[in-house]
Image: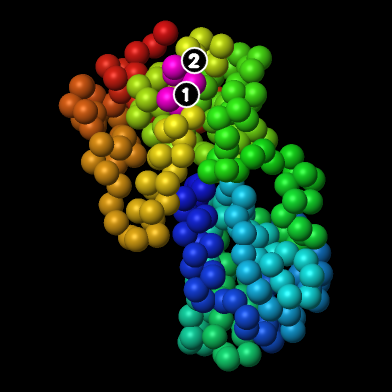
Amino acid sequence: MPELPEVAYQKKYADATILHKKIVKVETGDKKIYQSDKNEFEETLKDNQFIGSDRLGKYLFLNLKNKRVLVVHFGMTGKLEYYQHEEIPKYAQLTLTFEDHSKVSFTCPRKFGKLYLAESLVKFQKENGLGVDALALQKEQFFEILEGKTGTIKALLMNQKLLAGIGNLYADEILFQVKIHPTTKVDQLSEKEKIEIFKKIEEVLEVVKKVREEGRKLPESYITTVRKKGADCPRNNGKIEQIKVSGRTTYFCPTCQREK
């Protein structure tokens, strides 16, 4: 599933391709993707144009000239595809044709993505109970989030109502980098461990974000590069193991990340 770094790339892609172009045609797909009536999307988008974009966690906000915002959640397989030919991509769930005859499609093969119309990012965040963006997180905020929590640290990192943007993949990465077992309870963490996690949240997300934007490979020191049961630990400390944490498949090194 696209997490914060991948959505940051989609934002950069949108900024480079679809801004300040009048939308002359709107074609919609499966109604399950649309979080309000499809006719409302058609009426709002037709003859409008995108003038900028924002990102909050895993959501991309495409700001429209004539008020309102198109909000994109990419689900498991969603992405934007900009092109200048007539053939619409397979799995397109929304296709916009611009005045210059170029097009953009939101493709989503598994149909787990969602499209919303919102008044603003702030209102959408409040209405959907989304937490602070993981890359805007301050140390004091993080410690407040941890206060009184007794669940696992991995579940907390993935809780979008507390921290927006971290999913299964990079929660595992953050915990591997700080050598903390994913089932560790929040109230078992030392002050030093809390600070290390806070620092690694920004570091890991920024590294992956840059890698995605530049089309490079992740560092070999990242567990994400060997995300498979029985694979060699990137630190050469044994084999990667797989368990379930909060219902999610989780990869870790039992030597590097000892259970408390």
Q: Is residue 196 magenta?
A: yes
Res 249 visible: no
Q: How many numbered dots are placed on residues in this image? A: 2
User: Alpha carbon of mark 1 to alpha carbon of mark 2: how far?
Assistant: 6 Å
Query: Tag 2's secondary structure?
Result: helix
Horizontal side of 108 relative to 26 (left or right) equals: left
Query: Where does the image place residue 100, in percent across and percent down from the top left?
Result: 58, 91
The residue identified by callout 1 is 195
Name the magenta segment's main secondary structure.
helix
- Return the residue nearer the eye: 12 or 228: 12
**Residue type at the position of mark 1:** Ile
Query: Where does the image place residue 37, in percent across and percent down from the top left?
Result: 81, 64
Occupied quadrant, residue 126:
top right
Query: Where does the image place residue 150, in percent across and percent down from the top left?
Result: 61, 14
Q: Which residues are magenta?
A: 192-197
Q: In the displayed structure, would residue 90 be above or below residue 7?
A: below
- Return the residue nearer the eye: 231 or 161: 161
Q: Residue at x 62, y 50 (%)?
A: 56
Check whether the beta carbons of the residues at disc 1 and disc 2 lie within 8 A of each other: yes
Image quarter where the C terminus lies is top left
Q: In the displayed structure, would residue 113 be above or below residue 235?
A: below
The residue identified by callout 2 is 191
Q: Residue at x 51, y 62 (%)?
A: 10
Mark 2 neighbour class, 10 Å CA radius: few under 14, some 14 to 19, many 20 or more: few
- Return the residue nearer the eye: 236 or 19: 19
**Residue type at the position of mark 2:** Glu
Horizontal side of 107 relative to 63 (left or right) equals: left
Q: Residue at x 76, y 62 (%)?
A: 117
Q: In the displayed structure, would residue 128 be above or below residue 119?
A: above
